[in-house]
Amino acid sequence: MEQRFETKTKLLIPIFILVSVLIFLAAVIIQSYSSKINSLVALNEKISLSRNVSALIHSLQKERGLSSGYITNYNGKFTRDMLKQRKISDDYIKKLFVEFDQIKCENLKKNIFLIRKNLNSLFEIRKLIDTHKYTPNEVIQKYSNINTLLLDMIVNIAKTSHIPSITQNILAYSYLLSYKEDLGIERAQGVILLSLDKFDKESFTNFVTIMAIAKHNELIFLKYASKSLKDYYLKHSKIKIFTEVDTLEKKILSNQQDMYSVQAKEWYTYMTQKLNILDNISQYIEKTTQQQIKKELDDAKLFFIIIVILLIASWILFVYVVVHLLKLIKNEQRLRLVMDKYIISSSTDLKGIIIDASQAFCTISGYNKKELIGKNHNIVRHPDMPKETFAELWKQIKEGKSWSGKVKNRRKDGSFYWVYANIDPLYNADNEIDSYISVRMDITENELLNQKIQKEEEKIKRQEEIMQQQHRLAQMGEMIAMIAHQWRQPLSAITAASVAISVKASRDKLDAQTAIELSTKIQEFSRHLSMTIDDFRNFFKSNKQKTSTDFKKISENVLSILEDSLKKNNIEVSCQYENVKEFVSYEGELKQVLLNLIKNSEDALIENNISEKKIMLIINKKCLQICDNAGGIDATILSKIFDPYFSTKTKKDGTGLGLYMSKVIVEDHCNGILKVNNTIDGAMFEIILGDNNDE
């Protein structure tokens, strides 16, 4: 009996312990599901909030694009649409403020405070836009700051989700909105670039940079997107408007001539249509996420009831708890696997020895964990990275500060990759630094794109240098012809004088006075030849130092070289000096430009057989006009005459580089403008130097 009691006791004790544990576990699980239900309900409300936030972001993106167009274009193309869009934005702001008052989540209150503050400042920003107190880029920055805060709120909402599939959906949603925001900035930068009177390198660089960032965020969105979401996005991205936008982007990136065939308003309209489609896709994500939350919420409620019921039957409850615990462990492992797979991270001790590394770090570096752990982090250090960068890095993190920056790393196979790294110190219980953690983002594609752009710029520069050399050779040929022409008369005179001396001497009729006179003439003609050589040598002297000069000095020098050729062709040259002003520039290059323009006028006058040939130079401060009466330039080719290798000469002896290189010299080298117009009598070329040429 005692033995049987002992047996029962032995059985009861584990059963009691088991039931107690099960009851405890049941209570814990009930509490967990209660929290999960509350969390899902709150998350569902936050998703609704994120929809309104997304709608406001979309509206502000349109307002930003229209405002940048309004600032850049003073002719009012964007004014009416901008004012209309402001009213739409104000309606969304009012709705959002009402919803903010109902939010109780402490994690979002800091975002809400900053958003309220910045949205309230929006009205002052608009006033300054209306009075043109901002530059286009400042307008973009102001609106982008507000949208960044709104996007941060959506990212914080994603952090409140603890269900991997939902978290993945919200992360994909936040990156889609980031991609959409980048496209909004690209739209505004495109409006600025296409609205300028001339090509602006800084605006072009800003446009290319934001386009690269947008492409990068699109790739991240596609990485996080589920298969069904990715298929939905790719299906919508194949429609005509996406193709139209790609075509416009290629035109803008190809060359300046194609770029300005795109109108700013046209660019804005197509980009807006694309952003509207992306907004519809974001609404689809919100809808599917809410459906997913509803399903999870329904499942959670059902499990809650089941757990309560199963609490009565301990064994059933025990089985359920075991299964559920395994499920939780599996979900946690899955979440860790997702983080481990996509986040490039590593941890080191105080000496830089790796103590942990994510799978993403292993994948990008080419090493496995066994090869990394225990090794110094400089195992992935690329020799191209300067030592000063790492010295500054270690100095900052040892002082307890964060360090961020671009780093080029080396893979195991010797190839390279670029990351944007953020390194932070970690502290122990005694508030002492005991390790460092680094989180990185792969930016290899972006860096390669930047390098490609730099190579293209260098290629263009080399091509321009070749063209300039060809142009100089062509000019030198013309100069040699002019030298030969100018030397003929002095050489003939010298020959005649020497023959006279010889004849008179042979007949004993060479008296001292005659010898002196003939010798003096020979010396004058020789001096004239020497001065001609000096003039042409100085004209082609390679001097890239800026000097103080003026258009009168330049024109007199060029006209002295062309004097004989102009007289020979009966061309009357007149100069009008309204206000001569000194400036600092490349005198030799400006002489080449003026020589080329006058020679073009001379050729046109001869070719068109003008009876009274005239060329007039008008100088006013830093402006020089070259006018002729040769009948002007055909209107059908007027816009093409500055293109490389385009020649108007019918004799087929033109290189087509003269006017192109003249424009490059004036606008790229001398910070000026070279333009052409037809007057009543002929063509008028105008050189206008900028303020950077002041003394």
Image (spheres, grey):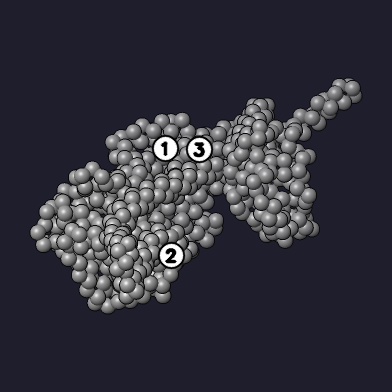
The residue under the point 38% across, 61% down is 533
Instruction: Please provide percent x and percent y for residue 398.
Output: 74, 58
In the rendered image, the residue lying farthest to the right is 2
**Viewport quadrant of the N terminus:** top right
Residue 504, located in which quarter of the rendered image?
A: bottom left
What's the distance in space between the residues labelled 1 and 3, CA to CA?
15 Å
Q: Residue 571 vs residue 335: left or right?
A: left
The CA distance from mark 1 to mark 2 is 31 Å
Q: Nearer the viewer, residue 463 or 401?
A: 463
Horizontal arrangement in the rendering, residue 76 relative to residue 22 (left or right): left
Question: Residue 572 appears at what percent x and percent y?
Answer: 17, 66
Q: Which residue is mark 1?
A: 288
Q: Which mark is residue 627?
A: none
Residue 678: tell me if it is visible.
Answer: no
Q: Amino acid at mark 1?
A: Thr
290 in relation to 534, above or below: above
Query: Which residue is label 2 attached to?
Result: 118
User: What amino acid type should be assigned to the residue bearing mark 3?
Assistant: Tyr
The local secondary structure at tag 1 comes to helix
Q: CA distance from mark 3 to mark 2?
A: 30 Å
